[in-house]
Amino acid sequence: MGPLSNANEKYFKDKQPFWNLNIAHSTYDEVWQSRASRSGTLTVGTGAFAPIKPEVWNFEVSGLQIVPSWLGYRMKKHRGKQSSPLDHIHATAWTASFTTEFLRLLWIVEATLLDYPKQQALLEAVVGGPVFRDRELAPVPDDMREAPAASGTGGEQKET
């Protein structure tokens, strides 16, 4: 048969849509991200992770989708911020340690989501509870209203 790229021409003859999709999108690109978020199954190479709940896939911290971001940094065609020459060093294959890390990430996100109802109840109790009014707090002395002056190396404040 030769290289895998010959398989379609010799055997599949464009009759295997999933094969064609893999050939056209051999890296973790938008096509696979979209499929993973809809189907609940993430395919990486010849392996698959499932089920991945949509709320786990879409979980964000400060606008960053954790799961797609984690994957993007570990793919052959690296995605994400490029801030140094070290960003051009990346994995060339999916490793067993990636599988372990990824499963741990999914478990942590799932556990975090399970705690959200308790977190919401706590937030509501805090916000709905007694609060201090500004007039109940001690006054701030004028000399404490300015930022401390920059210092040399020890972090101590300069006397003025």
Image: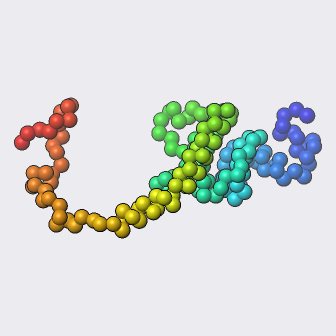
Which residue is outermost to the left? 160
- Nearer to me, 134 or 30: 134
Q: Position of residue 114 (x, y in %)?
A: 56, 55
Dividing the image into 4 quarters, which one contains the N terminus?
top right
Q: Residue at x 91, y 48 (%)?
A: 13
Side of 138 relative to 81 (left or right): left
Side of 35 relative to 158 (left or right): right
Side of 133 relative to 51 (left or right): left
Dividing the image into 4 quarters, which one contains the C terminus?
top left
Q: Residue at x 64, y 58 (%)?
A: 54
Q: Position of residue 138 (x, y in %)?
A: 14, 59
- Nearer to me, 97 or 25: 97
Q: Residue at x 22, y 67 (%)?
A: 133
**Quadrant of res 104:** top right
Number of marks present in the image shown: 0
Q: Residue at x 51, y 58 (%)?
A: 116
Q: How is the structure coloured here?
A: rainbow
Is residue 31 visible in the rendered image? The answer is no
Q: Position of residue 111 (x, y in %)?
A: 56, 50
**Quadrant of res 127:** bottom left
Q: Position of residue 86 (x, y in %)?
A: 51, 32
Is residue 140 visible in the rendered image? The answer is yes
